[in-house]
Image (cartoon, rainbow, N blue to C red):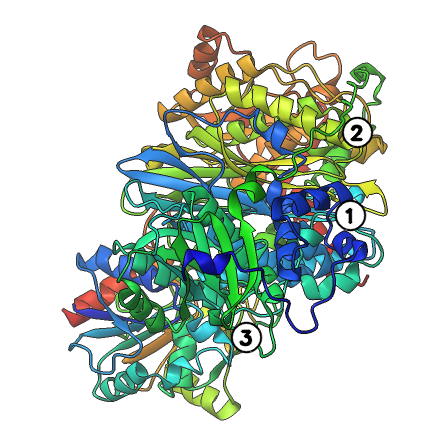
Amino acid sequence: MSKSAMSAAPVKLPNEPAITPQIVAEHGLAPDEYQRVLSIMGRTPTMVELGIFSAMWSEHCSYKSSKVWLKKLPTSAPWVIQGPGENAGVIDIGDGQAAIFKMESHNHPSYIEPYQGAATGVGGILRDVFTMGARPVANLNALRFGDPKHPKTRHLVSGVVAGIGGYGNCMGIPTVGGETNFHAAYNGNILVNAMTVGIAATDKIFYAAAAGVGNPMVYVGSKTGRDGIHGATMSSTEFNEDSESKRPTVQVGDPFVEKLLLEACLELMATDAIIAIQDMGAAGLTSSSFEMAAKGGLGLEMALDKVPMREDGMNPYELMLSESQERMLMVLKPGREEQARKIFEKWELDFAVIGHLTDTERMVLSWHGDIVGDIPIPPLVTEAPMYERPWTLTPLPPVLDAAKVPAPKDYKASLLTLMGSPDLASKAWIWHQYDHLIMGNTAIRPQDGDAALVRVPGGHKGLAMTSDCTPRYVQAHPETGGRQAVAEAWRNITATGALPLAVTDNMNFGNPTKPEIMGQFAGAIMGMVEACTVLDFPVVSGNVSLYNETEGRPILPTPTIGAVGVIDDIAKAVGSRLTKAGLALVLLGETKGWLGQSLYLRELHGREEGAPPPVDLAVERRNGDFVRGEILGGCIVACHDLSDGGLLVGVAEMCLAGGTGVTMKLPAGTAAPHAFLYGEDQGRYLAATDDGEALMAAASASGIPAVLLGYAGGQVLVVEGLLSLPLAELRAVHEAWLPTYMNSAA
Amino acid sequence: MKAAVLVFPGSNREGDVAQAIELVTGRRPNMIWHGDGDFEKTDLIVVPGGFSYGDYLRCGAMAAQSPVMAEVKRRAAQGVPVLGICNGFQIVTEAGLLPGTLMRNSHLKFVCADVHLKVETSQSLFTNRYQAGQVIKVPVAHAEGNYFADAETLKRLEDRGQIAFRYCAPDGTVDGSGNPNGSINNIAGIFNETKTVMGLMPHPENATEPMFGGTDGKALFEGLVESLS
């Protein structure tokens, strides 16, 4: 099409409504935002144009409330190949290989329709990773559900877990790790954060920036249907009682087609036919085409009638805004269309040339020859709304005096209460529904270590990966909570012996127009910035989910941290299983007995109070570097970081994972045993070693506080003078809660 | 031993079994696309795990109708050994190479876990490196692994020694406690009458290396190499 074609005013389609203030409001555009649309366009937009602005300027796609804060995160390091801004982050893991990863939320759809919402969340994050040329090697997920007593919780757990499994299992990507919490603050707004890690060759990474005027734009994958229209806008508003009527805006996943799309894309990527590629995720064809053209500084003409359609009677508005799954947009080298078409036809997928690149920097959309939309691309991107919303930091709550928290009358009962509580109980019911072994590279399975460990195909390297956040800490004090989430992820990777390399963040918060919510966001970012800087742990990708509120009640602020680390020789890695009698158990790091915001306080005393445990990042780094060194040197043979529940819960988890008991005693002069055993002081590890004396000496030489707690052996967990608990009894309680809960009638 | 591994749209454990075969033979098996009804002569045909055609019809039902399976049936009739694992077991059953069927797990959920298997016989190409009565640990990963056959078929399988593996407790007790899916008679794997075709739900290919699930599955592939080389 010539340049003159695009200057024609778009035609109005039959039955196209006039743009009224009500239609503008229904598109989630504020009046001043609509004024900006008018000034960019110089005329009233058509419906499809309005829909495009609405989607591109939604919170979900534009990051308009969060961008000013996200910019503060450290994003570079010598090993970072690609930071935030692409489909996923890319880091160099040596030997010409890169790890490509990202975490993304699918919260709102999963609440409305848990199976499809969670399934398509997995599908979307998988596409983000394989779009860049990586074969996915592992999935993780971080799930937050409401109070188990809430009438919807059981249904949501069941649907979300089945959806994640249904998609990942069919794709043949192992789901190797994650976390699951319950809290009443998520009753009306659960969180489903899915993460994918893939591997690519460093010289075969694919990006979204379009290049080459005249080059063909190609659509591949599934046909476009009417599902998920305006999903991005839906996820950018609060929930209310009508939200469940939005079920039709939830997309439906087809993992079989995505598996074919994965194989077809990787097959085509092995050739040199692709110039740029972008998956169609939130806001579908709109955001993918705009991003590709904008990044390449080019224009685009698309004939929407060429888009493969699932049903008759679809219009340009629907085609541009559909969030049908399993679709990709590519720019090919000229003349390579037939080569590409053959591959996609072999995999029985749709393939259509729907347009070409221009030098106009305009997006021109046609429908059976008529222009129906014509939008200048740069102002849509550069003049997108960006808000520095008012924010109020959450003050640090008073520190809780551990001496004023009652000790349990019965230590054995208190440990059983904690180990059988929803947050600490075994999640085996969940991860047994996920194929965590496919590909044959899973070295540390769920529950056997602090991070999952997966062999990098074709060598001896391992990738450690984890997802972490302690929302109750973030709620109490966002800066501390943000710092802690990053530190715990770093610690979990370290506890396997791997070197933590980079982070993907999934920021889940409430309504950003409320200053206290924006203050939570700001505070969490401040804490994350500090931790990522001190720990050399840059953020390479991420996702923001705001408006997680129902009827005005926000979720706990939840900045989920996904992280990846590498170990050069996977044979040197350790898990947390205590498998051998005689091993010495050494506590590394300082214990003051911090009970504020602890699970002990919440589960035993029903109190959520006090300041969360502080994180001294210099100490964190010193302790972690020491532990990693002792693992790689062979001294530490099993390791577990201490987090939720504190020391005694950590010991219990190591016993259960390896099927071996422990006999330990408290250090002489411990004033408050319950604070020592259940305090959640940070920067600590439990290490098992054949040579306790040597580890104690090494710790002392490095200035690391260390306590030789006791030795492994037998089938009983004994804390001298306080409790003696057979592992069988402990295991029964730990493993019973979730299946019992899921199998009981609502 | 020359091995061929079939690949259907939606297969996803073909790489795992190819890796296991390569580990014991030192050579990569041929990967055969589902549309290829005329593939090279081979000593062993493996039908791997996955979700062929999305398993959107009954598991394995569509793959059983593919051109490659028509050829597999011809070669199986000539005595070429066929190993069907998981979705492959479902496919060879649907193709009529083995009796019975695989139903939805009795608890209705996908299950991925290590299970213990009792080796029922060492008298086959597939199990000659095991001892009868030996207990091995290998994983399962399926939603439709609940083996069923009618009473008459079951009696024939039992009487003729066509049961290859049964789910058991870690100490070898076959009492249902180790059965992950509700399979009748705790059946995890079966042979055809000539014991040249074996189907099983568990994944021996995911138990061939010490750090990655143990090595109890490796002997199955070593036994095949010994018999077929």
Residue pointed to by mark 3: A310
Residue at figure coordinates x 48%, y 26% from the top left: A537
Direction from residue A292 to residue A24 in the image, left or right: right
Q: Callout 2: helix, strand or loop?
A: helix
* A194 lies above or below A484: below
From where the camera sits, is residue A359 visible? yes
Dot placed on the residue nearer the N-terminal end, 1 or 3: 1
Residue at figure coordinates x 51%, y 73% from the top left: A368
Of tags 1 and 3, the one toward the viewer is 3
Direction from residue A478 to residue A142 in the image, left or right: left
Residue pointed to by mark 1: A238
Q: Residue furthest bottom?
A: B152
Residue A228 location, quadrant? bottom right
Q: Are marks 1 and 2 in contact (CB under 8 Å)?
A: no
Residue at figure coordinates x 36%, y 45% from the top left: A199
Q: Amino acid at mark 2?
A: Pro
Decide which of A496, A106 is in the foreground and name it: A106
Decide which of A605, A521 is in the foreground and name it: A521
